[in-house]
Amino acid sequence: MHLRKTLGAVALMAVAVVGCSGRDEEPTPDGGPNGCTGVCNQNDGGTDGGADAGPRVCPAADSQGRGPIGQLRANGKQGDAVKLDYVVVTAVDDNTRGGQGDYISQFWVVDPCFPKEGIWVDKYYTDVTKNYAAAVGDTVSIEGLFRRINPIGSDVNTTSSNAQEKTRNAYRPSLKSAFQIGDPNIKGSLIVTKTGTAPVPPDSTVPAGFGNAAGGTAQPNPEYGGARIHIPGPLTITNANPPALKQRPENPDSSIHLGFEVSGGVLVSNYKTFGVTFDGGTPRCDWRNVVNDGGTVSFPNGIRGVWDTYSLVGCADGGFTNPNDGGTYSSCTFSSRDAGAIPGTNNPYTYILYPQDCANDLPGVATP
């Protein structure tokens, strides 16, 4: 049976209409999405001259208050054809340049009328526009296929980026091409078209009690999935080595963890903040090491980042190979991978915070 369908009821025509600016600002308390009460001021940054700018009506919410992306995350089926118009890039997961100037580009977007709802986009080298490398603040139009990332089976070829994706992003709602999905019954392209630039919607400040993963056994606050959020402080690192984020749970001698836990049971990824940068070795804020060396780390003003899914997909034989840990991806084929789970639990995935940098998202205070 052909799985490619169109989300007719959702009518995914999310238009980026930015009437609010400044990431650190909060939406005005007028009850409307992102400070808008139904008519937002479109401002695409002027790269197209702004001739088409003007007031427009925000996309309609469903009975649960969800916009197009929220509805897609909740109800999307594998291979559904999706069109998002003029959404805004809020964070860039990875840009990898190919030998012909083409890019793997993986990034998150939101419709500014519904800034609590985001989705991860996985553009491969051959996807159009081939030379597009996402940047925060880009407004883009996207045509693609919905995919809740499959931790086993296809989800494509054996590139290192896709193997790495499977170890962290399994079960994540995403937009891809049929080539990336790898199912012969699903057809369709991923087309990303930059239409301009715009102010990024402010991070959504979350309520008290947000994000408690209960040691990885829960899937907290999916309603913020794919969006940038602010968890207010003060917070502290309560566990620098949470079992839920252990990279090699089958190896009792391994001390590698892929993040830490802060006050309230919130799990935090450190894949963009540990060790040193990849472009020359600039030290970053390796807060896990501070705590493991006997110090304490606090975040008086809280922490920020993208809230999205996390899972661990190891090899069915118990091995988990990683080039950074002396292994190779090729020694564990996709067909021999487990379905993915949070270590020590029966939970296939949880939600964690993905800070994008140290200065803005993870400004901590270390005490020896």
Image (tube, helix red, strand yellow):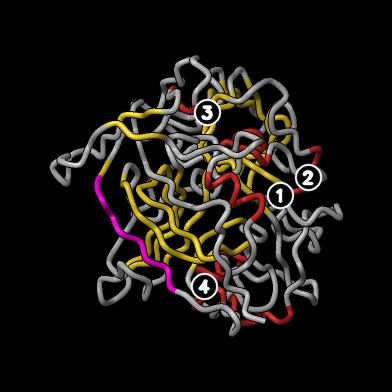
State the residue position of label 2: 216
- Closer to us: 304 or 226: 226
From the image, state whether disc 1 or disc 2 is nearer to you: 2
Position of residue 138 in the picture relative to residue 315 (left or right): left
Give whichever of discs 2 and 3 has the lower sequence position.
Answer: 3
State the residue position of label 1: 245
Instruction: Tell me where residue 323 appears, x and y as whole percent.
Output: 56, 70
Q: Are marks 1 and 3 in contact (CB under 8 Å)?
A: no
Give whichever of discs 4 and 3 has the lower sequence position.
Answer: 4
Reply yes or no: does residue 66 show up in magenta.
no
From the image, state whether disc 1 or disc 3 is nearer to you: 3
- Closer to us: 124 or 260: 124
How many residues crowd mark 2 within 10 Å: few (<14), some (14–19), many (20+)? many
Query: Which picture quadrant has residue 162?
Result: bottom right
Confirm whether residue 368 shows in the render.
no
Three-letter amino acid code at disc 3?
A: Ser
How many residues crowd mark 1 within 10 Å: few (<14), some (14–19), many (20+)? many
Identify the magenta region: 189-196
Q: Are marks 1 and 2 in contact (CB under 8 Å)?
A: yes
Reply yes or no: does residue 194 show up in magenta.
yes
Three-letter amino acid code at disc 1?
A: Leu
Query: Which picture quadrant has residue 251?
Result: bottom right
